[in-house]
Amino acid sequence: MSLDWNSHRTQLVATALAASAVTAGLFSAYQQHVRRQKRRTLDQDILRSLSAPNKGKGTTREDDDDPHEVQLGGIDQQRGLPSEYDEELVREQLARNYAFFGDEAMAKIRKGTVVIVGCGGVGSWAAVMLVRSGISKIRLVDFDQVTLSSLNRHATATLADVGTPKVKCIERALKQFSRVVQVDARIDIWRKESGGEHLEGADWVIDAIDNITTKVDLLKYCHENNIKVFSSMGSGAKCDPTRVQISDISYTMYDPLARAVRRRLRLEGISSGIPVVYSTEVPGDVKLLPLPEEEFQKGNVKELGVFDDFRVRILPVLGPLPAIFGLNIATYVLCELAGKPIHNPLPVKGRKKFNERLYRDLHKREEKFLGRQINKLPVDDDDVGLIFDDLYRGRSARPPYAVPERPALVRWDPSAPLSLQNCVAFEFADAEKHLQECLLEKRSPEEVWGAEVVDVVKRRQEEARRVVEWVM
């Protein structure tokens, strides 16, 4: 069908289409111009803020009673939001999060209020990633100041921040990359007598405290008042990121801080229901820093209840580990706020049945060796997992130290009680041989297995001894 360009109707249609195309082009060009102009204005505003006096430290108003009050250039103080930074730019900044969670979930995240108690290595990283991911209301509670030794693990602290409150240091950083965040920075210590004021309005509380008494008080308060809380266990003296995981407090293992917290909470009638991040790693050769005299002057040095002669603050800390803990916390809380929670973390779920089978097999061998029925072994499911995975690296003690097709554990020395030190990993057939020849027939392990295996077991026994000292 050919068009009659001499037709009046055809000419009108063509004119209308051309006008529509021109209008659409002009409208698109105008939108692009407005967006470029907003970005240009924002860039200039940021540059002015960075080039202002005392950059990185903020400025203080002469009539302000708080010497640490943070002020940033270019912000409308009445609204707390620069007029040129509208919703369009906020959504562009959070575009990747919107793509992951969707509009409805992101709306929940942006409306959420998070309180972080303890703003050191763990708490600072959690704060940074929560705000970068869309949290617009955050309260920071910590009485401590930035020190030089903080700089190996703190998310926002710089040399210029040494001697300033940690909460203000974090507040300055958060306001540098989010123009919509409302930061309530409180230079205070959380106390159970008045701590409710710090938790008011919280959708989630993050416990990043390194004092066990205060930590337990906070967790108990949140549990009793139905406030959702996530707790960080010990990240000090650890170096293996593959051992970091999230679980309920009742499932934690090998972490001395988690053990002490779990015991104290149980005395308060709380056995589960608190998610935590912790590490199953048992440190090897960890040298604790000496306890300075001023630490004794601050109070009871045994307040942690895990070790008798030092506080958490003098544990060796590898900087990335507190960061990993903090990022785990931020991820968990974001998913919870979005309505997309993390269920049944894989490490806990995947190893439980395996450890239970190891335990049942060991239980049967002990009954055969003792010649009577026993109700409970002196080691539990977690202990047998530690023996196989950590002490024997998931391999048999017998050369060539292969990964067993059917792993098994058996008592090593018949004259000593079953324990972490007196249990060895073998292939199933070797474990049965050891039971028959070494335990029942009383032949020496060296005669049955040779000096090389005996030497391996001695080294593992020494490791087990250090584990007992660390964990127990």
Image (cartoon, grey):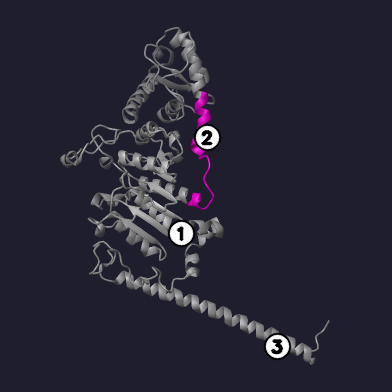
Q: Is residue 61 left or right of residue 320?
A: left
Residue 347 painted magenta: yes
Task: Locate residue 159, reporting x and y percent.
Answer: 25, 57
* Image: 287 above or below 463: below
Mark 1 or mark 3, earlier in chain: 3
Q: Position of residue 190 (x, y in %)?
A: 31, 47
Read off the residue under disc 3: 15
Question: Which element type, helix, strand or loop, lies under badge 1?
Answer: loop
**Residue 187, magenta (yes or no):** no
Mark 1, residue position: 134
Q: Residue at x 35, y 70 (%)?
A: 77
Which amino acid type is marked by label 2? Gly
Residues drawn in magenta? 334-357
Q: Residue at x 37, y 72 (%)?
A: 76
Quarter residue 52 falls in: bottom left
Rounded to the nearest angstrom, the CA distance separating label 1 from label 2 is: 33 Å
Q: Are marks 1 and 2 in contact (CB under 8 Å)?
A: no
Circle 1 Cα neighbour tier, 10 Å, few/some/many (<14 / 14–19 / ≥20): many
Q: Which label sits in the foreground, 1 or 3? A: 1
Q: Amino acid at mark 1?
A: Gly
The answer to which quarter of the image holds residue 155 is bottom left
C-alpha gap between disc 1 and disc 3 = 47 Å
Q: Quick one: label 3 or label 2, which is nearer the N terminus?
A: 3
Circle 2 residue: 350
